[in-house]
Each structure stands twice: as structure tokens, then as C-alpha cells.
Amino acid sequence: MPKSDAVSTAVAGEPRLMDPTVRASRSMARELLDPEFVEVGASGRRWTYDQMLAALPEMAGSSEDRPCYEPLDITGVLLAPGLVHLTYGTTINGRRTRRSSLWRRRSEGAGWQMYYQQATPVPPEME
């Protein structure tokens, strides 16, 4: 897969993980999260794959009738074959967060999945 295709595929995966329909469905989220997934959330909490899948349907942005995440300025770079690094921002309910994620594809023909995510809150004075 050419470099631009790998980055484009990972970039397309980020908004899917912010889609309330995907967030509310463990089976849909499972397709986009790597089994070795780890997140350090904006709260500082460390999340594992199992913890995230269990909690995601109840988390912010998991329902059409509540505030949803809005992605901002997603950019990416291919670090190595099968590994893409994305940086971007999100807003939800007036709060901004800067994010960094790693997407990987374990083998040719396999789908791209988020392997790692780091979220850092943006203080109001930095917006």
C-alpha cells in the first residue's frame, strides 16, 4: 500500500471512532481498535482494549442525542510499513483536546486499527 493510501486510511478511521453509532457498538469499535490497544486519556487514566470496549458505549460522544466529538485538522505520517502516526484536535461540549494516535496494520490485507492514543486537554487560555 503506498504511503499516501496508508495515511488516508488511518485518517479516515479517526472520525469513525468518534461516530456515535460506532462508539455505541462494541462489535463496530472492535474492528477499529487493535487487540493491544492502550490509551492515556485526557483525564490521565490508562485504558486497555478490554476496558475501552466495555466503557465506550457509555462514554461521551456515544449517543446522537448528546454532544459528539468533532475532529479538527487531522494530519498523519507513515512511520514505517504498517504504522501511521496521526495528530489532531477534538472538541466536545466546548472542551478542546489535542490528540496523537498510532494506527497499525498487522499484515497485508488486514485492516488498520488504532494501537495507541494520547489525549491532552487544551486549557482555555491556550485555545
Image: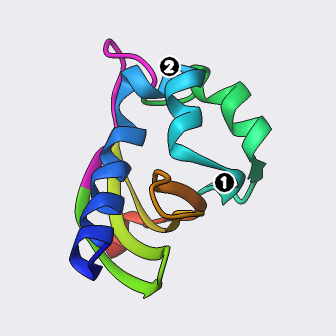
Callout 1: helix, strand or loop?
loop
Spot the residue most to the top.
Answer: 65
Q: Which residues are magenta?
A: 62-71
Label the magenta part by its dominant secondary structure. Answer: loop
Q: Which residue is mark 1?
A: 43
- Does residue 125 lie above or below 23 as drawn? below
Question: Residue at image x 22%, y 76%?
Answer: 4
User: Is 46 inside the magenta-drawn segment?
Assistant: no
Question: Residue at image x 34%, y 27%?
Answer: 67
The mark nearer the N terminus, 2 or 1, is: 2
- Indicate the position of residue 91 as horizontal and vertical percent values: 32, 49
Under mark 1, the amino acid is: Ser
Q: How many marks?
A: 2
Question: Residue at image x 59%, y 23%?
Answer: 26
Q: Which residue is mark 2?
A: 24
- Indicate the position of residue 97 as horizontal and vertical percent values: 42, 60
Q: What is the quadrant of the C terminus in the image?
A: bottom left
- Does residue 16 lie above or below 98 as drawn? above
Where residue 64 sits, quadrant-wise, is top left
In the image, which disc is placed on residue 70?
A: none
Callout 2: helix, strand or loop?
loop
Q: What is the quadrant of the N terminus in the image?
A: bottom left
Where residue 50 sits, quadrant-wise, is top right
- Indicate the position of residue 86 as horizontal and vertical percent values: 39, 72
Color scheme of the displayed model: rainbow
- Does residue 105 lie above or below 94 as drawn? below
Question: Which of labels 2 and 1 is toward the front?
Answer: 2
- Indicate the position of residue 25 as horizontal and vertical percent values: 52, 19
Is 30 on the left-hand or right-hand side of 49? left
